[in-house]
Image (cartoon, rainbow, N blue to C red):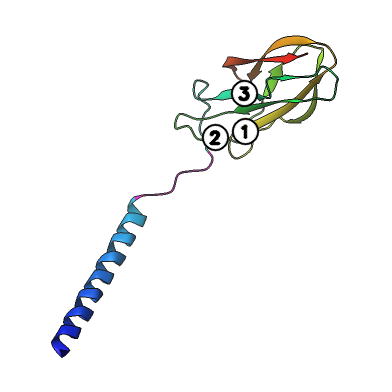
């Protein structure tokens, strides 16, 4: 009976040592993903979108434009200035034009004029290749 307990204790000790070894090996082999990048912006990886796509043209109801500037690995590029190409009849009520640690910039838009507009974004050096269509009705 005593040998049976010694065998079980030995087996559990060996299993514990093997588990610790695997955890240490996995932790040192696989590093965490970076949360922000100091690299250069890859325009083809970057994007913009609007939410909602339409709003009342009452000067109060907003459409939020969100831009993500990403590098070649899809990681956000921080501290970049973004601007929008807007018609003069659309007003920006709130903005975060410098990208945060996730590469995100935001703009809240209102209009008192009913219209459809294609919104584009640009950085200091280049224009994003896509646009978003919004409607104020």
**Does residue 42 appear left or right of residue 30 in this picture?**
right
**Is 32 in the magenta?**
yes
Residue at the disc numbered 3: 49
Q: In this picture, is 4 found above or below 43?
A: below
Q: Residues within 10 Å of mark 3 (few under 14, many from 20)?
A: some
State the predominant SS element of the stretch in magenta: loop
Where's the N terminus, which quadrant? bottom left
In the shown orientation, is residue 93 left or right of residue 79? right
Mark 1 vs 2: CB contact within 8 A? yes
Q: How far across and down, in percent of the image, does residue 87 sit?
A: 76, 11
Helix, strand or loop status at disc 1: strand
Residue underneath mark 2? 76
Category of crowding for the residue at label 2, using alpha-carbon neighbours closer than 10 angstroms: few (below 14), some (14–19), many (at least 20) = many
Tell me the quarter of the picture where residue 101 sits.
Answer: top right
Magenta residue span = 30-36
Mark 3, secondary structure of its residue: strand
């Amino acid at each position: 009976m005593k040998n049976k307990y010694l065998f079980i204790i030995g087996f559990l000790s060996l299993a514990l040592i093997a588990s610790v070894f695997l955890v240490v090996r996995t932790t040192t082999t696989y590093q965490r993903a970076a949360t922000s990048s100091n690299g250069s912006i890859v325009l083809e990886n970057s994007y913009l979108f609007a939410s909602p796509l339409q709003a009342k043209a009452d000067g109060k109801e907003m459409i939020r434009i969100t831009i993500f500037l990403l590098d070649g690995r899809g990681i956000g590029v921080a501290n970049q200035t973004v601007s929008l190409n807007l018609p003069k009849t659309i007003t920006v009520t709130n903005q975060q034009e410098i990208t945060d640690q996730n590469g995100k910039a935001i703009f809240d838009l209102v209009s008192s004029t009913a219209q459809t507009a294609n919104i584009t974004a640009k950085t200091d050096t280049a224009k994003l290749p896509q646009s978003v269509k919004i409607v104020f009705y």
